[in-house]
Image: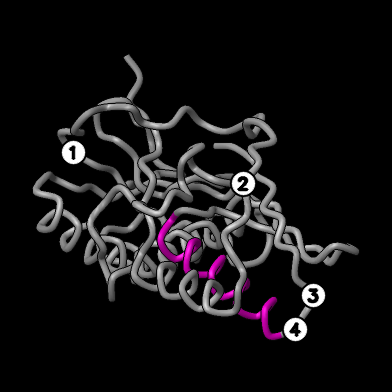
Amino acid sequence: MVTADIPYLVSNDADIELIESLVSAWWKNGQVLEWQAARVPEGIRILALLPKHDALVAANNSVYAAKALEALNARGIEMPKVQILGPEPESAKQCSCARPASLVMFTNYLSKGSPVRCGDCFGPVPLYELPFTQDFEHLDVLHWAADYRACDTLQMHCTTGERFAEAQLGRFDSSLSKQGRGIASRLSALAGVPVYCFLMKARGATALD
């Protein structure tokens, strides 16, 4: 993962709203993982965490990102030059396999990267490199990942909702697991490879010799 600076030289509220729609479309497509915006004297600057250096090239855009860019172009606002500031220090190495033999839906409370991993190297696979899973986006995958991380946070903090969170993370028939298994089934059919969901085991007896 890399952090990028995306400077838009605009100050009009309507233009800023369009830019926010564009970044949101990038996020729903997995091209942007996280972002922060700041008003500066020359306009607005977006600091975004990207899966790869080339995540924002036009070929990776969803139809919604393309439409947002068209709306900005119609107002005379062109895509600015994206400056890559550097790698995210604690990020996992991205998958570089030509064609993974399988995929794994996996995340945790600390994860910032794609919630889909390569079954061969276990590196994160950017969502925009995968078939769309819902309405030409990957919003269902992102929502599952957010729910998973919320449950993982509860069980890690060991206070409110710990047992509930463990059941959601570790039970095959929990609502969280059913949500993930449904997405995995759709993605498997679209990608043509097996897609698995990670189940956490927090407690249990271990047989000793």
Badge 2 amino acid: Val
Q: How far separated are the C-alphas under marks 3 and 4?
A: 6 Å
What's the residue type where badge 3 is placed? Ser
Is 170 placed left or right of 101 in the picture?
A: right
At label 1, the amino acid type is: Ser
Q: In the rendered structure, does residue 18 fall within the stretch colored magenta?
A: yes
CB contact under 8 Å: marks 3 and 4 = no
Camera-side residue of 42 and 99: 42
Q: Earlier in the sequence, mark 2 or mark 1?
A: 2
Q: Position of residue 180 (x, y in %)?
A: 30, 62
Q: Earlier in the sequence, mark 2 or mark 4?
A: 4
* Quarter containing the N terminus: top right
Please give left or right for residue 145 compared with residue 109 in the image: left
Q: Which residue is mark 3?
A: 11
Residue 113 can be seen in this image: yes
Left or right, 52 with reference to 156 = left
Query: Could you say which is closer to the camera, residue 73 or residue 139?
Result: 73
- Cα–Cα span, label 2 and label 4: 22 Å
Return the disc, 1 or 4, that comes first in the chain's sequence. 4
Residue hosting label 4? 13
Label 1 sits on a secondary structure element that is: loop
The residue positioned farthest toward the front in the image shown: 76
